[in-house]
Amino acid sequence: MKSLIKKLLFRSLANQLFFGVSIKNGKIAESVFLKNGHQSLDVSERHNILCERPFCIGVWVSGNDSASFGKMRLKLGIRREEKLVVSLGLRLIKKLERDNGAILVFEIIKARCHQINLLHQWLLITFFFSNKKHGYKETLIYGALYSYPRRVIVASYKNNEYYNIFPMDFQGEYPEIETYLLGLRVSNITVNKIIESKRVVVSGTEGIDSKTMYALGAHHSKAPPQLEMLPFRVGESELLKFPVPSFSSSYQEIEITDHFKLGSHMMFVGRIINSKKLKESQTSLYHIHFFEQLKSDYDEV
């Protein structure tokens, strides 16, 4: 059945759900809007994924908007060229008040992807994309969330002889309030160390290749090799002396001010204590889902 469906309907179907794409700075074609009835707020650059089970997102809203959009039930929409490509139903589960606004944490309760018709979407998810790790609903939400490109960064930590460097895209930087939000899987072997030290460094991935990136992905669950064995040079951050890869054009040193277990992931709220630009960069690395990549013209890494 699976091979017949692919032959008839999806001959050019890729054997992957997510694509690494290179996007020029400021050239993301999609935009994200938080909706409260007839009110709509652009949150393209102030929202990020935080948790997988349950799926949660964080959104920063300023003081003028925190009352209107800090409601129990809201919607999130993703558009491309004014066309709605994704709609999500949200439920507010946490509100972190700040002097000039609030960080809102929403659980995603339903999702709809509009890039392809419902039948083709059901066939793709049922026969090709779902697996033992992710069922139909989780796979659908992944498709919805990653219809907006998710920037990939590298997080690093060091303490005495121990260090770790790993990529992640459950993250978001909010320069307006000098804050960084991170969503780290609780099974990541470095989570407790970050909680204890309240320190982490995040670096860009502008010069990384896909082979190196996926190799670093293994560091989430096991100890990495010695620093000198890595396939790239490593420097040190200015204040914390944490590892900074040579492929990074910039980094931020972060002091963790709060952390909350949301489910499968730990949410970290960090204060940016130092930002450093190392070199010029015109592009960044992002992850995007197959549903949206079908319609986009982003360059695959």
Image (tube, rainbow, N blue to C red):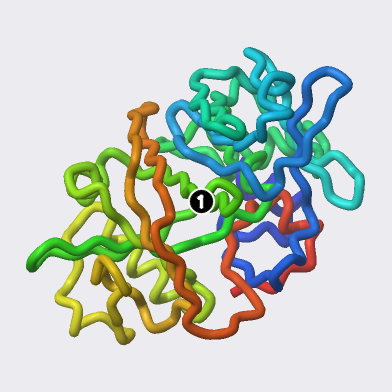
Q: In this view, does 263 lie above or below 125?
A: above
* Left or right placement of residue 93 versus residue 232 in this view: right
The residue that mark 1 highlights is 178
Q: Position of residue 96 (x, y in %)?
A: 49, 27
Q: Where is residue 219 in the image (x, y as percent from the top left)?
A: 26, 61
For residue 7, what is the image quadrant?
bottom right
Q: In this view, does 71 lie above or below 9?
A: above
Residue 278 visible in the shown view: yes
Q: Residue furthest front?
A: 99
Q: At 41% across and 70% down in the image, what residue appears?
A: 213
* Left or right placement of residue 113 versus residue 142 in this view: right
Q: At 44% across and 81% down in the image, what residue appears?
A: 247
Q: Where is residue 180 in the image (x, y as percent from the top left)?
A: 47, 49
Which amino acid, by three-letter code, is at mark 1? Glu
For residue 300, what is the image quadrant?
bottom right
Q: Which residue lies furthest to the right in this view?
A: 82
Q: At 39% across and 75% down in the image, what residue appears?
A: 212
Q: In this view, does 12 lie above or below 241?
A: above
Residue 15 visible in the shown view: no
Q: At 38% across and 41% down in the image, what residue appears?
A: 268
Near-viewer residue (192 or 145)? 192
Q: Which residue lies furthest to the top in this view?
A: 72
